[in-house]
Amino acid sequence: MEARKIIIHTDGGSRGNPGIGGAGAVITDERGEVLAEISEYLGDDVTNNYAEYEAVILALDKCAELGFYDANIEIRADSKLAIEQLNGNWKVRNPSVKKQFERVCKLLNKFKKISFKHIPRKENIRADKLANIAMDNEIS
């Protein structure tokens, strides 16, 4: 029997870079059924790259909470930097991003199979909206 496929769209943002940060993620099954959504304010001194990684961390935490340990998980994001670093193609040089990268790597050990895919921004609209909602709610 083939493992269940879980698709996660993640996005993080920062207004000011560094500035007000938010993370968003949408977790779906292979049919596109939404299993969970995440929208979390990250603080007022957050970089964009930190927020991108935090979105991945929050999504993986949620997958663990939902018990998707044996699923085939594909994480999709429009952050070329994060995806290339997580795929091992680019080095992680920034110290705060390095800490985030290490947190993601630690979480990866909980799951059977995870892949990372870079997608165009236009394919990441819902995750982007959730990140923006988190930032908007903090300002209003």
Image: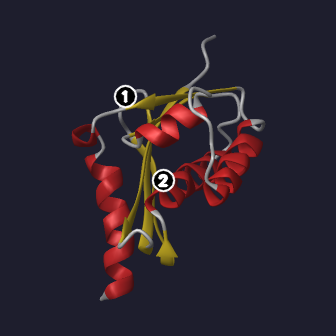
Residue 107: image quadrant is top right
Q: Give the quadrant of the C terminus.
A: bottom left
From the top left corner, tell me how far across and down residue 120 is, in percent.
Answer: 28, 35
The residue lying toward the viewer, choosing from 64 and 56, is 56
Q: Give the quadrant of the N terminus.
A: top right
Question: Quick check: can you spot residue 42?
Answer: no
Left or right: 98 with respect to 42?
A: right
Residue drawn at (65%, 37%) of the image: 68
Left or right: 23 with respect to 111?
A: left
Residue 47 in the image: above or below residue 98: below
Foreground tag (2 vs 1): 2
Residue 22 in the image: above or below residue 129: below
Left or right: 100 with respect to 47?
A: right
- Residue designated by label 1: 31
Label 2 vs label 1: CA separation? 25 Å
Which of the two labelled residues, at mark 2 and mark 1, occupies the earlier sequence position?
A: 1
Residue drawn at (30%, 43%) of the image: 124
Q: Which residue is farthest top?
A: 1
Q: Helix, strand, or loop for circle 2?
A: helix
Residue drawn at (44%, 60%) of the image: 48
Q: Helix, strand, or loop for circle 1?
A: loop
Left or right: 3 with respect to 11?
A: right
What residue type is disc 2 on?
Glu
The residue lying toward the viewer, choosing from 23 and 51, is 51
- Residue designated by label 2: 52
What residue type is disc 1 on?
Arg
From the top left corner, tell me how far across and down residue 36 is, in percent.
Answer: 47, 52
Residue drawn at (40%, 68%) of the image: 17
Residue 102 in the image: above or below residue 133: above
Q: Which residue is farthest left?
A: 122
Judge the density around disc 1: few (<14), some (14-19), many (≥20) Cα neighbours within 10 Å.
few
Q: Which residue is farthest bottom?
A: 140
